[in-house]
Image (cartoon, rainbow, N blue to C red):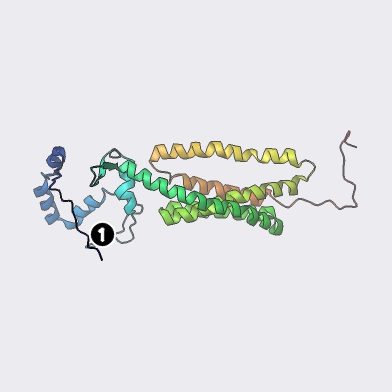
Amino acid sequence: MTEMFAVKREEKRYLPDPRCKAAAWTPDYTRSYQEFMRNLEAFWDRIVRELPWFEPWGQMKEWNYPYAKLNIAHNCLDRHAAGDQKDKPVTVWHSEGGEERRLTYDGLYRGVDAGLATLLVGFFAIFNGAGRPAFGGLADRISPQKTAMLTFGLIAAASVLIWLAPGVPAYIVSFAVLWGCLGGWLAIAPAATASYFGTCDYPRCYGVVFLAYGAGAIAGPQLAGFVRTATGTYLGVFPLVAVLAAAGFAVAWLLMRPPIAVPASAPVPVAAGEE
């Protein structure tokens, strides 16, 4: 077996930036120490409030905060990438060949986000495609009304889940449900249109129904962008989606009643000029 040795050795010193050295000293150390000794709970209460908490704590103990919730990835990366420090270097990578690469908060965030998004797009597309035969079959079996109510309930539940428990697992589950429901409506809408208006006026009626997709494609991104600009996160979009889904559930329950069937023996009224 051939032994391997390190044949390259460099005596290099990487000194910190002078500005970093100047800011590294803590001039208020004595004051902070005295505050800590006077009132331990008040000191840590002030310190931890510098972090964004998704759910505040009920009380503070010696080393933990019961019932409180925070997201480590959000505190370590996301909040910096969305703030004034987004262009600040986080990691400096230096290869043996002399190549150097600096990763900022924003660059690291975009890299992780892009890689995960690329992987999940194909995953969500599976649910989008599977939702069409699944919800189409349900529309035939239990009626378009009940199927529509089911999708609105799933959309509301998925939106509440990602709003209350933000994170990658909740994101994957919620968006799989949302994409499945989106695909399902490509089967529910045509079935409901034919059921309520018949095949005679189907092309014209479904054209009007399908306008909702166009309206949603325009209004949805605009609303999401407005919420993102105002709050710095997309999480505020999901309560609105849940409310709209609840409204859709109510509309489906009240208005999507089964159509009244006309017996085959009864004459069908025909308008003048259509004989």
Judge from the rendering whether residue 140 lies leftward or rightward of residue 21; answer left or right: right
Front position in the image: 96 or 88: 96
Q: Is residue 223 above or below residue 32?
A: above
- Residue farthest front in this picture: 2
Q: Where, quadrant-wise, is the N terminus in this rendering? A: bottom left
**Residue drawn at the location 37% of the way across and 43% of the way down:** 110
Where in the figure is residue 148, as x and y percent of width and height? 63, 52
Where in the figure is residue 210, as x and y percent of width and height? 65, 40
**Residue drawn at the location 54% of the way across and 37% of the way down:** 219
Q: Which residue is mark 1?
A: 60
Where in the figure is residue 238, as x and y percent of width and height? 47, 47
- Which picture quadrant has residue 92? top left
Residue 155 visible (yes or no): no
Judge from the rendering whether residue 142 lies leftward or rightward of residue 213; answer left or right: right
**Residue drawn at the location 84% of the way across and 51% of the way down:** 262
- Which picture quadrant has residue 40? bottom left
Judge from the rendering whether residue 39 lies leftward or rightward of residue 171; answer left or right: left
Where in the figure is residue 200, as x and y percent of width and height? 80, 42
Q: Where, quadrant-wise, is the C terminus in this rendering? A: top right
